Amino acid sequence: MIREAAVAGAFYENNIKHLRQSIEDCFTHRLGPGEIPKLSRINDDKKVNAIMVPHAGYVYSGPTAAHGYSKLVKDGYPETFVIICPNHTGFGADVSVYNEGSWIVPNGVADVDDELANAIIKNSNFASGDFLAHRNEHSIEVQLPILKYFDSMFKIVPICMMDQSVEASIDLAESIYESCSDLNRKITLIDSTDLSHFKSQEKTIEHDNLVFNEVKNGNTEGLYQVVKNEQITICGYGPTMVSMEYCKKLKQKNFELLQHSTSGDITLDYASVVGYGSGVWY
């Protein structure tokens, strides 16, 4: 199954030259890390187990995402990236694993690690092989051009979560851990999520900080409850909980928040903004 780019020309540049420049601009932007990192070729002592990055258009969230990617690039690429996102379209399975084929973006092709993908499905009570959820979903696709900018020698396992319950998140984390152990696969999780949506700048920062507090404490149930109780409009709390639980399995659950911004920091319109966070688990 070949998955063609669905949001090229909308969320990011379709022209390869312009795409490359826009990615570099994310890193050198005033809200970015300030420099374009160089990929480490030393993979024996990897420290970054998972990263949180946003998935809006590059002009809005790219500089914030660049902080997480800078850490990842300096740490070195794994064999496979397991990229987990929320389901924005409402189509497909509850936990949808794209388990064969390739994804095409303007600057390269990413092959699916079908062996790992099918192992995750086998070891999970929630996940199933499904392509429909991924057909028009943007929140995994937008990560690929940035990954491809630095190197092409990696595979991916795209997972889209419509069911973002604590139970599904814990199950998926355990399945990923067990499958990687069985296959001796080195991976890094990419948790693709935007934070509070369409609140004032002040309320967005308040709500986002409630999320970060639970993430830093490694409190998966606490994150779920604060999202529900405070009606926080973070779209990818499920992928975040998977990252939290997976890193607990590795006994390396420390989370470092690298950058927190909003769309208002780009547009200078603070009346109704979207929050973006970038961080790493190590």
Image (cartoon, rainbow, N blue to C red):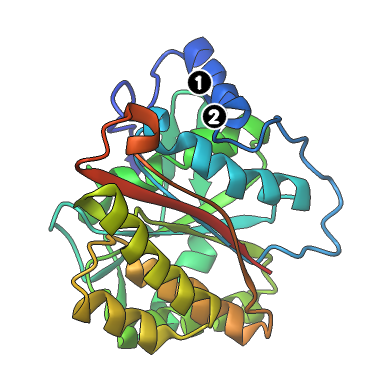
| In the depicted structure, whether residue 175 falls above or below residue 99 | below
Closer-to-camera residue (213/137): 213
| Residue type, mark 2 in image | Cys
Q: Farthest left residue?
A: 90
Closer-to-camera residue (107/260): 260
Please identify the quadrant where the C terminus is shown. bottom right
Q: CA distance from mark 2 to mark 1?
A: 6 Å
Which mark identifies residue 26? 2
Q: Residue at x 31, y 20 (%)?
A: 9
Which mark identifies residue 22? 1
**Residue 84 lies in what quarter of the image?**
bottom left
From the top left corner, tell me how far across and down residue 160 is, in percent: 31, 61
Q: Residue at x 68, y 85 (%)?
A: 251
Proximity of marks 2 and 1: CB atoms separated by less than 8 Å: yes
Q: Label 1: few (<14), some or many (≥20) within 10 Å?
A: some
Which mark identifies residue 128? none
Task: Tell me the SS state at disc 2.
Answer: helix
Q: Label 2: few (<14), some or many (≥20) within 10 Å?
A: many
Task: Tell me the SS state at disc 1.
Answer: helix
From the top left corner, tell me how far across and down residue 141 is, in percent: 39, 41
